[in-house]
Image: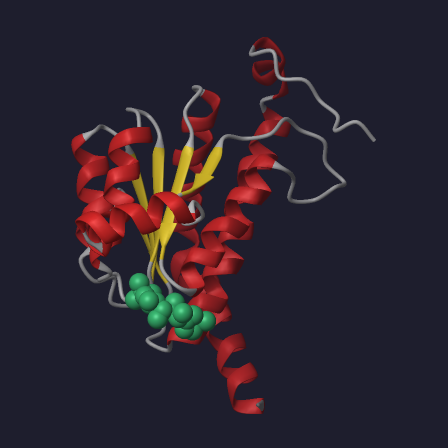
Amino acid sequence: MRQHVLGSIDVKQRLLVECEREIQQAAGLLSQALRSGGKVLLCGNGGSAADCQHLAAEFVSALSHDFERPGLAAIALTTDTSLITAHANDFGFSHIFERQVQALGRPGDVLIGISTSGESENVVRAFRCARLQGLRTVALTGSGGGRLLALGDVCVRVPSTNVQHVQECHITIAHLLCMLVESGLVVAQPVAAAAGWGVGHGK
Ligand SMILES: O=C(CO)[C@@H](O)[C@H](O)[C@H](O)[C@H](O)COP(=O)(O)O
Ligand SMILES: [Zn+2]
């Protein structure tokens, strides 16, 4: 137990030193897309699928309730079981995210792919499709980056090969991305007002 927790702390400390620039770049892409009326799509498998839902919920609903802001457009491509089972059953599991990017993605949107290996075929295919369609891409991976390294406009490579430690950092990065996008909204409040964004969540 001690070994796992201390290992996790060590990777998080290195994350701050080694990945700060990429995290800022990813937040910049997201802010730009959301301010221009674009949206965020997210894909990943297993624990990373859960991270996709987690982050999409915080964009649309709220990260911190101390801060009031409009819902931000984000869709986890991991949640529609009818769509995923139909498409996997009929065309194969490697196509489940690609198909949704093709159907829902528009130029100026951002696709976030979360993969510890950077090698999940369905995420790789989604990234290729996103690039062809004019979306920007952000990959959250482990230290190797896999094939996503070359496919992401930004690739945040957590400095570890331990899958669990990488995942523990991915959710931290997800929170940071949402936090940085929100803090940009504070600075850009006149822009938000001009775009007709209300404030308040009814409490
Ligand atoms: O959460 C875990 C392991 O901690 C697993 O569910 C893990 O996410 C799955 O094995 C994924 O299929 C791994 O895919 P990826 O991270 O290499 O893209
Ligand atoms: Zn896990």
Residue 154's x, y, as percent? 30, 46
- Say which of 72 and 175 sits in front: 72
The relative height of residue 97 versus residue 192 in the rendered view (above or below) is below
Q: Is residue 116 above or below residue 31?
A: below
- The quadrant in which residue 25 appears is top left
Residue shown at the point (60%, 11%) measured from the top left = 196
Q: Quadrant of residue 132?
A: top left
Q: Quadrant of the C terminus?
A: top right
Left/right placement of residue 14 relative to residue 105 reads right
Q: Is residue 154 left or right of residue 17?
A: left
| Residue at the farthest right position | 203
Residue 154 appears in view: no
Residue 93: image location, x then y, percent: 24, 55
Which residue is painted at 32% across and 25% down in the image? 108
Q: Position of residue 19 (x, y in %)?
A: 40, 57
- Toward the viewer: 1 or 203? 203
Image mark count: 0
Residue 31 can be seen, yes or no: yes
* Residue that appears at 30% across and 38% down: 100
Residue 18 located left or right of residue 103: right
For the rendered model, the colour scheme is secondary structure
Which quadrant of the figure has residue 41?
Answer: top left
Image quadrant, ligand 1: bottom left
Query: Residue 89 versus residue 142: which sits nearer the camera?
Result: 89
Q: Residue furthest bottom?
A: 2
Q: Position of residue 21 (x, y in %)?
A: 39, 49
Front one among 60 and 100: 100
Q: Quadrant of the N terminus?
A: bottom right
